[in-house]
Image: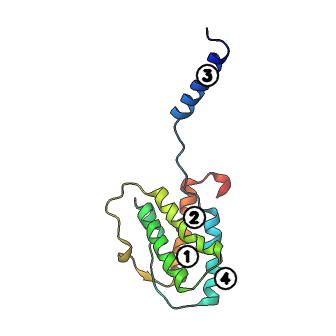
Amino acid sequence: MPRGRQALASVCLCLVCLIVLMPQLAARPCAQDTIKKVQHLINVEAPKLGLNCSLYTPTVDHYKQKCPGATMKCFAGEMIVLLDEWEITEAHLTKLKTTLTRLAEQLNTTESGCIQCELFEVEAPETFLRNLLKTLHEMNTVHCPKKTR
């Protein structure tokens, strides 16, 4: 039976092994803060700016139909275009670019048969943002704990 330092080293080694062997929880793509930012764009920025541009716009059905990663990747790319077009420089809104890209990476699985972003319907920014909002709500329904929905 080990004693002293040898016993302590054995216990530490066992704890390290347990921590390493425990299954790691995958990052859950929850988007509560992102939803608030998109709502701000719909309610405040869109009416104020009213610029006439068009964006490739996936729908929540594309997200549900085995293509969540590709759908979010398209939303992320088009959000970059929208924020640049509207010349939005507020830090909390420009972070939408990286947040949506990160969400797409978290959802990225092997997806075959998905529509490329350039093949989606071209819509006005308000329609694009409403579809993004619906998709984020759907994502939260599937991936987030009930208290954060």
The type of residue carrying mark 1 is: Arg
Q: Which residue is mark 4?
A: 44
- Residue indicated by mark 3: 9
Disc 2 target residue = 137
Mark 4: which amino acid? Val
75 or 85: which is nearer to us?
A: 85
Residue at image position (53%, 82%) is 84
Disc nearer the start of the sequence (2/4): 4
**Residue at the (64%, 58%) spot, across then down:** 149
**Closer mark to the observer between disc 1 and disc 3:** 3
Q: Residue furthest front?
A: 5
Viewer-side label of 3, 2:
3
Residue 102 at x, y percent in the picture: 52, 61
Q: Residue furthest left?
A: 113
Vertical side of 38 occupied by 45: above or below: below
| Residue at x 40% of width, y 54% of height | 109
| Horizontal and vertical percent position of residue 122 | 42, 82
Q: Mark 2 near mark 4, Cβ–Cβ under 8 Å?
A: no
Circle 1 packing at 10 Å, graded few (<14), some (14-19), many (20+), is some
- Give the alpha-carbon distance from disc 1 to disc 3, as whole Å: 57 Å
